[in-house]
Image (cartoon, rainbow, N blue to C red):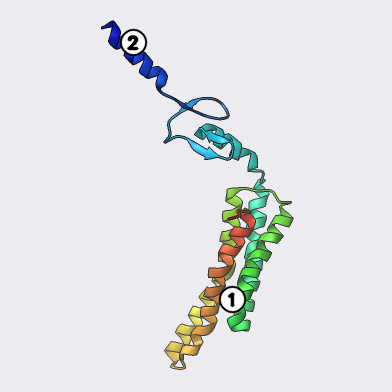
Amino acid sequence: MANTTKNTQNQDQDIITLRCSRCGKPITPEEAIQTPTGYRCEDCVKQQQKIFDTSQPLDFVWGLIIATIVSFLGSLIASFIGFFTVLIAPAAGVAAAEIVRWVTQKRRSKRLFKAVSAGVILGGLPLIIFELFQIFQWFSVGSFSLFSFLPLTYRIIYLILAVPAAHYRISGRRR
């Protein structure tokens, strides 16, 4: 019996436990979050992320308003320039993000990224809805052609390209 107790104590000493590199708390491999400085527990990672959330409540309002206005203007231009929407849309998304960054003095928050993305979508939707109503009117009158879909198509392409460009630029993520 004494021999088995001795064996289990040796086995317990051989077990290497994973610890958080910041607080030293024992963690399981499933709980461990890899960082550049080692593995950390979820609590330490959340505390570190709170440091980077510097936005103020008014930043979300300004972000939404500015992104909506810039996106509306970009969507308006998109129907006039036709195929070159492919070039203008990402530039409009980046412009919206940069103006928001300038107004908010480069304060950051995950919710701010979402507010800017929502603003870009809200700015592009009114003209898409207007184009849909026009197409339905033309269809009911009988003066419908496939070319009447082009402005709608360009505005949809605008949104598809502008939203990710704005979100990527304001989030500051690098790949």
- Label whose residue precedes the other's in the sequence (1 or 2): 2
Q: Quadrant of residue 65?
A: bottom right
- 63 relative to 75, above or below: above
Q: Secondary structure at mark 2?
A: helix
Residue 175 in percent (x, y) is at: 58, 55
- How many marks do you count on the picture? 2
User: Which residue occupies the foreground of this view, 91 or 38?
Assistant: 38
Q: Quadrant of residue 144?
A: bottom left
User: Dot 2, how many residues are within 10 Å of its Cα: few (below 14), some (14-19), or many (20+)?
Assistant: few
Residue type pointed to by label 1: Val
For the residues labelled 1 and 2, the Cα–Cα distance comes to 72 Å
- 107 relative to 16, above or below: below
Q: Residue at the bottom extreme?
A: 143
Residue type pointed to by label 2: Lys
Residue 147 in percent (x, y) is at: 50, 89
**Quarter of the image where the N terminus is located:** top left
Q: Which residue is mark 2?
A: 6
**Which residue is pictured at 61% across the width and 80% down the height?**
84
Q: Residue at the top extreme?
A: 2
- 134 relative to 95, above or below: below
Q: Secondary structure at mark 1?
A: helix
Residue 26 in percent (x, y) is at: 47, 25
**Which residue is pictured at 38% across the width and 18% down the height?**
12
Q: Which residue is mark 1?
A: 86
